[in-house]
Amino acid sequence: MAMVDVSDKAEIFREATATGIIKLKPETIKLIKAGEIAKGDPLFTAKIAGVLAAKKTSGLIPLCHPLPLTNVQLDVRVLDEASVEVTALVKAKAQTGVEMEALTAVAVGLLTVWDMTKQYEKDAAGQYPSTALERIKVVRKVKQPVQKT
Amino acid sequence: MAMVDVSDKAEIFREATATGIIKLKPETIKLIKAGEIAKGDPLFTAKIAGVLAAKKTSGLIPLCHPLPLTNVQLDVRVLDEASVEVTALVKAKAQTGVEMEALTAVAVGLLTVWDMTKQYEKDAAGQYPSTALERIKVVRKVKQPVQKT
Amino acid sequence: MAMVDVSDKAEIFREATATGIIKLKPETIKLIKAGEIAKGDPLFTAKIAGVLAAKKTSGLIPLCHPLPLTNVQLDVRVLDEASVEVTALVKAKAQTGVEMEALTAVAVGLLTVWDMTKQYEKDAAGQYPSTALERIKVVRKVKQPVQKT
Amino acid sequence: MAMVDVSDKAEIFREATATGIIKLKPETIKLIKAGEIAKGDPLFTAKIAGVLAAKKTSGLIPLCHPLPLTNVQLDVRVLDEASVEVTALVKAKAQTGVEMEALTAVAVGLLTVWDMTKQYEKDAAGQYPSTALERIKVVRKVKQPVQKT
Amino acid sequence: MAMVDVSDKAEIFREATATGIIKLKPETIKLIKAGEIAKGDPLFTAKIAGVLAAKKTSGLIPLCHPLPLTNVQLDVRVLDEASVEVTALVKAKAQTGVEMEALTAVAVGLLTVWDMTKQYEKDAAGQYPSTALERIKVVRKVKQPVQKT
Amino acid sequence: MAMVDVSDKAEIFREATATGIIKLKPETIKLIKAGEIAKGDPLFTAKIAGVLAAKKTSGLIPLCHPLPLTNVQLDVRVLDEASVEVTALVKAKAQTGVEMEALTAVAVGLLTVWDMTKQYEKDAAGQYPSTALERIKVVRKVKQPVQKT
């Protein structure tokens, strides 16, 4: 068990985009659109939680390197009548890629949507028959030499 | 935007079980089974990362209450020729449920499997055409009065 | 140097409310009201940052006890043409008070407003001639025996 | 809501100095000067808490970038018969400024002084009629090209 | 790999004391006694670092339960002409013992002494020929039913 | 009390190796070798805990600089019939050394072994008569100019 040794790799420009969705009840989606979720706006809250989570990645995933992220952007939107989509874009000048940071931002963003809407998703027995996170994946990775400034 | 006020709720026994899967290439699954993943055993590493993540939930999800977890158990196993499943069981005597802790453990466990196997999942262009987290959900919640001791 | 030993104190209901303000330029306040701050809504972001910070208090203030907070609520609003006010209410059933948690939530909430608006507050030399946090204080503390449930 | 993208900015030398005060009762100030605060030396404790807090800034303020700080210095002193002043100096070679780090160090340093002296500041009803943090501001920012070494 | 399930155990009063030493050069000990360590007082700094570390134990040791510590006390003193001793006392009303918290406080306290004195301990080649942490152990554990209040 | 100012130091390649041992009962060592520790494999768990701890060093040791570690490797093995040895290797391109990171990884790795085996180490009175961490030290430090890439 060992971190990959990136000591001899050059620092290049890194970028990664990840996405994922949370399946919610149509009634919950309507409440989100109407701005009527009692705990507050789940989309905005998910963005902030996701940005903070990206910065905590190396404290959560054992073999991730601590990276000096230069940008983290979250987009959270209602995708259709039964799902919300979270997209995260992460950039760094680093010796290794930032896809784990983007994925962590997406996962925590989606979990935040779950937490904000859970009272509407539970059934009478307190169970979640239909809520689920799905299709969390890396959409695109970029790496290119750093521009001299 | 506000945490739910649980000040007047009784502390009762809480339990939640969550699961999820990561889709991997069949060749990656074979390497896992053979114990040949270069970065180390992804299943064991995912268990530890998941247990630690459950304890960090209220630091990640903005409106989660800090809860005195009395048990966190992770099960991580090869589900079939193209997926690994993570299951997390969390318990507490608390004023609110522990499903977000179980879900967070599952999500971070699955992301850890991704991180440990990513060198085998990338294609020649450095992209992840098939890797994905799927079906992250709460399997079962329990709540019952605390037994007097 | 030692934490106060609260081992023999009874757990009672605790509540604390703290407030504070940040002095901003009138032009910045206008941008906030118009929803035109480039980095996003500073009021909503401050609420979330404050809630998360309340939960981190014992990791920031060396002699604070870790406390099982049952509620954290932030209110962030434009107070007048040159200031934003942050108010935090924190509750717990605990052996010691929660005023440090409320104060930490206010301080981090206010710092978040600063961070979100700093591009409008800097002068041509990159200095902050007028921005300041003021009047961070505890408005009210409550303690009372826990109601049996 | 999005972090400022600093990917294309050059790393230059950054420095920021912030200050702030805590208003305390004259009797509390006398106890500090006499070294008789029961919980221990609040000035020294505040320095350490402030240094640690500077390093946690990007985990507290949602849109702050994680920065490789090269120096953090805290000065904590009795300013007059009713106040203690905290000053923080932070340096980094970075793509964005370090004023939020200096401000966070000051705020947490001041909160630590509050926590260490709170037993002397409370009145008979357990309230804080006069304690307050005031004038937390950025005194000076510096940026200049990095010297070649 | 699983946390011990303490869900059905009664909350009782827990206390643990741990100690350990750091071997330093006699010249370093003299500097400590004379208050001449350039980075500041290593004994006081170690106390604070140890108290904070005790509270972080469940985030560091994977299978430790998060516990509501009611007291953490550190004693740090020059033991003899070549060693400093750190002692930590931790208390909680909990379902499991607090010895890992006491040990973590001692270990981090000792590491802090190392960090504060390292410039005097290094030889000409930048190595540490004699510095070492030794005899980190649990001196005493106590458990007893909680007094009714 | 102040961090060492490393702003003007060049970033060079840094490496540090630290080791330490935990004294355990021969029966406990036999259980480890047989893979029969109830809480799970203490050697593997210690490796992961140590890697994560190395990354948290600047949050634990007050005056440590946050460093962009490029590699952390832990080796944990049964040394003889009564001890387990943890070795940590840490690398970075940085303005200051990484020995505190290596030492922190070793200390937390050893504490994790303690936690995983504590049920076998306690005597009938719940005390630890023989368990101890010993000989935690820096084996070797390296610094050399960074290779141009």
Image: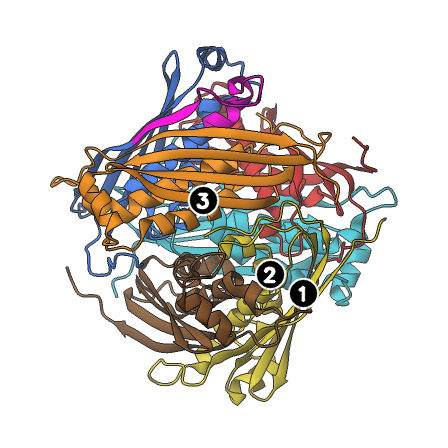
Chain colours: A blue, B orange, C red, D cyan, E yellow, F brown
**Residue A115 among those drawn in magenta:** yes
Using the image, name the chain to which the residue with label 3 belongs. Answer: B
**Residue bearing mark 2:** E101
Asked if marks 1 and 2 fall on the same chain, the answer is yes
Q: Which residue is drawn at 61% across and 78% down?
A: E85
Using the image, name the chain to which the residue with label 1 belongs. Answer: E
Q: Is residue D26 left or right of residue A101?
A: right
**Residue bearing mark 1:** E16
- Residue D71, image quadrant: bottom left
Task: Give the amino acid at mark 3.
Answer: Leu
Question: Badge 2: few (under 14), some or many (20 or more) residues near its Cα, within 10 Å?
Answer: many
Q: Please, what secondary structure does the residue beneath circle 2 have? A: helix
Q: Residue at x 40, y 41 (%)?
A: B108
Q: Which of marks 3 and 1 is in front?
A: 3
Question: Badge 1: few (under 14), some or many (20 or more) residues near its Cα, within 10 Å?
Answer: many
Q: Which of E106 and F98 is in front in this view?
A: E106
**Which residue range is magenta in the image?**
A112-136
Q: Which residue is drawn at 83% across and 38% down?
A: C145
Q: Please, what secondary structure does the residue beneath circle 1 have? A: strand
Contact, mark 1 vs mark 2 (Cβ under 8 Å): yes
Q: Please, what secondary structure does the residue beneath circle 3 have? A: strand
Q: Nearer the viewer, residue D89 or F132?
A: F132
Q: In this view, does A73 lie to the left or right of D89?
A: left
Task: Give the amino acid at mark 2.
Answer: Glu
The answer to whether residue A51 is above or below residue E6 is: above
Q: Which residue is the extreme one toward the right?
A: D124
* Mark seen at residue B74: 3
Q: Which of marks 2 and 3 is in front?
A: 3
**Residue D136 among those drawn in magenta:** no
> Separation of disc 2 and disc 3 at Cα?
23 Å
Q: Position of residue C28 (x, y in %)?
A: 49, 27
